[in-house]
Amino acid sequence: MLCRLGGRGLRPLCALQLGAWGPQRAPTPAGGTKRSALPLWPVRSVSAVSSGGAGGWYEALATSAPVQGAEELLLGAHTATGLPWWGSILLTTVALRGSVTLPLAAYQHYILAKVENLQPEIKNIARHLNQEVAIRAHQLGWSKRVARLTYLKNMRRLVSELYVRDNCHPFKATVLVWIQLPMWIFMSVALRNFSTGAAHAQAGFSVQEQLATGGVLWFPDLTALDSTWILPVSLGVINLLIVEIFALQKIGMSRFQTYITHFIRAVSVLMIPVAATVPSSIVLYWLCSSFMGLSQNLLLRSPRFRQLCRIPLTKGDSDTPYKDLFAAFYSKFISRK
């Protein structure tokens, strides 16, 4: 009977669904203006780290090909646009998020939507399979453990068949993380290298010297810390907004999902003091990246954009997603009694 089940094509379920670089200051050029020193404790300058010492792994990362590629990308954008360094960092971040992570995020939503649409079929298969196993267990005198293992083995096989049939294995939805996280790390280390006085020069001036005068507003020196904490706090607020928007989108989260949400909330808060110990150039990149992530999250809620990306409709989709989000946010954080 189990074989007959498989023959009918019964198949189920798909469930789916950032240390700190505290640059060491290069010696102030003779006759140069003395600037506030950055803390030395987080990480020693790459050039001061012994290849065989405790910091060898970081030296290897800081001089790796991907980080050098990120450095060249930033230098190329700065040279091509003629923008001050704060503008070059913003432009490069927007370009990377728009050309790399946005398409991957749309693909992630595409896979997740297909997985969600399989749930009714999966539940139906699970019910029938459970009945078939119960009958067979009674006929052959199987123990509860044997019956359970038989059920799980066949359920995994049938679920895999569904994934193959609809080409929507949940692992494909993790591609965004495997691309976005390394990119975030490489760009951060590249900016850290620039801020510590790495051997890059343009028009006779080191990149570190250019960054020291390439800021804007309250952070004119991109190699210094943001003593006002405005950038770090803004980073934490935006990251928390992203988490809350995700949480409001999920109804009836499992205990595991709730724990993960609380963990990400804690990481978002901890990123504030971490961001206060690194150069403003890095925090500016983090802030812009998080803002783009928030915008990307909201954009992927738009029915028109989802239709443009050919993301399948699901039972949980709404024609008024932004109105619903505001209502849920207001109900949870403003009108609480």
Image (spheres, rainbow, N blue to C red):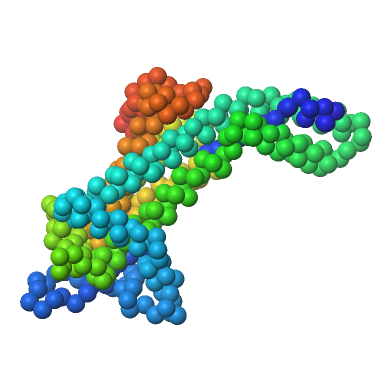
- Residue 217 drawn above or below residue 206: above
**Closer to us: 18 or 335:** 18
Q: Is residue 260 visible?
A: yes
- Residue 220 drawn above or below residue 309: below
Q: Can you give x and y, in whole percent of width and height, for residue 58 in the image? A: 40, 69
Q: Quadrant of residue 228?
A: bottom left
Q: Can you give x and y, in whole percent of width and height, for residue 105 in the image? A: 43, 38
Q: Quadrant of residue 128?
A: top right
Residue occupying the far right of the picture = 140
Q: Can you give x and y, in whole percent of width and height, for residue 132 in the image? A: 81, 28
What is the quadrant of the N terminus in the image? top right
Query: Relative to 60, is 214 on the left or the right?
Result: left
Q: Residue at x 44, y 31 (%)?
A: 249
Query: Relative to 201, is 54 on the left or the right?
Result: right
Query: Relative to 277, is 253 on the left or the right?
Result: right
Q: Quadrant of residue 245?
A: top left
Query: Relative to 328, is 161 on the left or the right?
Result: right
Q: Residue at x 37, y 21 (%)?
A: 320
**Closer to us: 21 or 244:** 21
**Closer to us: 72 or 188:** 72
**Closer to us: 96 or 19:** 96
Q: Residue at x 38, y 57 (%)?
A: 185
Q: Can you give x and y, in whole percent of width and height, for residue 10 in the image? A: 73, 27
- Residue 274 drawn above or below residue 10: below
Q: Residue at x 24, y 48 (%)?
A: 90
Residue occupying the far top of the picture = 319
